Amino acid sequence: MPILSKLFKAIRASFTMVETGLLALFFVQALRYSIGGIYSTVSAAVVQFTQTSALTDDLNTLLPMLGASLALPLLTLLIGGIRWSFALFALLIALFRLLMVAPDTSTPLLPSLVVVAGGFSYIVLIVRQRATLLPVFFIVGFALDQVWRAYGNTLDISLSRDYFPIQVALSTLVVLLSVINVAKPIPIARDLSVNHPYGALSFTSALALGASCFLQLSLFALPNAVAGRTSGDYTLLAPALIAATLAPLLPFVRTQARQLIAPFDSSTRGWIWLVFLALLVIIGTRLSQLTLGNVVLPIGAVTLVIAQTGISLLWWWLVRPQGEREFNLSGLWIVTSILLLGLFVVLDLFTYEYAFVASTGDSAGEVFATLLRGMRGMGLGVILLALFIAAMPMVQSTRRIPWLGASWQHNAAVLFVVLAMSGAGAFFARPVLVMPALNLTEMRVGTYNINSGYSATYTYDLNSIALSILESGVQVVLLQEVDAGRLTSFGVDQSLWLARFLGMDRRFFATNEGLLGLAVLSRVPIVYHDGTLLPSADQQTGVQRVQIQPDEGVITLYNTALGLLLQGESVAQQEANQRIQLNALLALIEQHVQNDYGGILGRAVLGGTFNNVPNAPLFQSLKATRFVDPFEGASLDLSATYVSPYAGRARVDYLWVWSDILRSTGNGVIPSDASDHRLAFVSLEIRR
């Protein structure tokens, strides 16, 4: 019965693949969460230490856990060759992944660190005993994570307490499959990377593993991040990137890649591949669109999708065959993967938060602070550096090309998986239906600085931010400090998630690295939008212009965030920076009036975070225009929009109304602590 025998072997092989894929998903989910969780814990500790000279209890608990997480993979030096160690680490990962969403868990951060450490340990086991499955682990893990996030509109649904029953089922399934697979192992196919399933990581390949994880986490496995950096369409990029991530699992794709580089000299293959990928990344992040006649091509998004396939193919080059009588040091080298990944996360962080680096006073510290402030505009440089390290195993390998083919049946089976998962991504990422608000006689407009989703004490809660917007009753809200997929905000496109949660349309304008900026959410139809960067001495900012149509005419909205006023810095210099920005903003409006509006501004609202108090000299030039402040004269108790447990309260967020046509009929502030700012709103009478 050869057919039944082959069928049985295929079913048994699928057990190993399902175990590997689900554990990879747990690992990726926990890794993403741990980055954001560490950032919030450290940020809260820094804020408290600045104000009270005391560290938080969370930070005191976090530091030993980080040390233990680094030490756990070292255990594989002793037990990495034992077959039953797979079941041990699978149980550890499944159990602590369950604890991340358990009802009694106060914070998912500590269990997530155990899952991450266990995941890296499991990677070492795969390298040592199932080396041909290493590419499968990473590719399937990141692809499944994209599908989960597409279902949650870029938010990881698996971190919700409501997900607990599903996680119970998945964790139980993983443990059962792991026990079955180690109790009666089956031969693993020899067509992926090495001639036998016993492999090892070198120091270089371990560094490449860490760099590759960073590339996937920060950009290439996040469709919303690719959309932000390329001005692409998220709904199209979601299925495209899932397919691009999974494509290298197709033997046909690996065969074509092998034929592409085989004619080149063995000493230059890796460099050619690296240069090819680097060019794709540079083009993708620097050239968003290409216009050919009347056709606009999304060249940036297309090139980054192609680059994702090329980067996914690099997973095959990480493992080398283990030599006879060689002591396997993979468990030691994997620690360098973790450390390098952490270094890249820090570098990525300061490409956005360079402006918050304060002077230290001493010469050595000042040099370090200067280097961090110099990370401004270096986002592409960090990605290219990670790409260079990720490609090093391919550059150094001159004896083999691990991209081998397989039977047509294997191609057909994998193709079905690729189509099914990318189809699921397309279905989940499809646009939601927005019920437009038309023919309005009154409209409520709000402004809300959401502080990248964090409260003043660095609690991350997008749901509370959404509820604050609902409570305000606004039809249109201007948002500032909005993330579109940063590592520190758990990879969420915040304006997209909020818009779909609230049933609103949205427009996003990036001011920093494509993933941090301004956004407008609206139930009133949006008919036009653009944006302009403003001159910025500290954090780069800009102004977003959006036109909405509540009736037969339009209302123009200007959304901005001026420079910061930071403690320890020269207030005069910072206020001078704000005046330069405000003057540039008003000059831009005047330019729009002359070039686009026929000399008449018409109905307009200027809002956002101006980072200064109402009686500041900054606003003299603005008060000289026809813009009026509906909150003028209101008490601080009723108008404060910035509330801090350490710095008190102030009004720094404004809505200015063009007085010629629009008239305010009421205003207010929503007393929510979801962000360190509060939502301010103005009700407007719609007149022509």
Image (spheres, grey):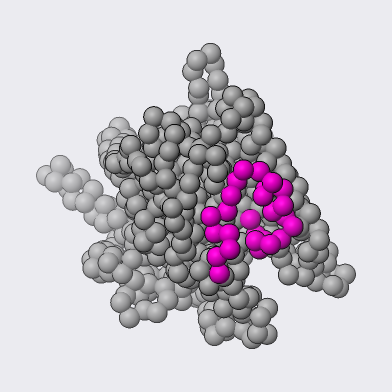
Q: Residue at image x 65%, y 85%?
A: 52
- Farthest top residue in view: 293
Q: Main secondary structure of the magenta part?
A: loop
The quarter holding residue 436 reads top left
Residue 170 versus residue 239 in the image, above or below:
below
| Residue 18 at least partly seen | yes
Q: Which residues are magenta?
A: 610-635
Q: In the rendered view of the protein, which quadrant contains the C terminus?
A: top left
Is 512 left or right of 80, judged from the image as shown? Answer: right
Residue 199: x %, y % from top left? 49, 57
Question: 669 or 213: nearer the eye?
Answer: 669
Question: 338 or 672: nearer the eye?
Answer: 672
| Residue 135 at least partly seen | no
Residue 583 versus residue 633 in the image, above or below:
above
Is 182 left or right of 546, judged from the image as shown? Answer: left
Q: Is residue 259 magenta?
A: no
Residue 226: x %, y % from top left? 51, 42
Is 434 left or right of 496, judged from the image as shown? Answer: left
Q: Residue at image x 26%, y 56%?
A: 15
Residue 239: x %, y % from top left? 37, 39
The quarter holding residue 687 reads top left
Q: Residue at image x 32%, y 75%?
A: 102
Q: Residue at image x 58%, y 59%?
A: 632
- Farthest right residue in view: 363
Question: 172 or 46: nearer the eye?
Answer: 46
Residue 75: x %, y % from top left? 50, 75
Q: In the rendered view of the protein, which quadrant contains the N terminus?
A: top left
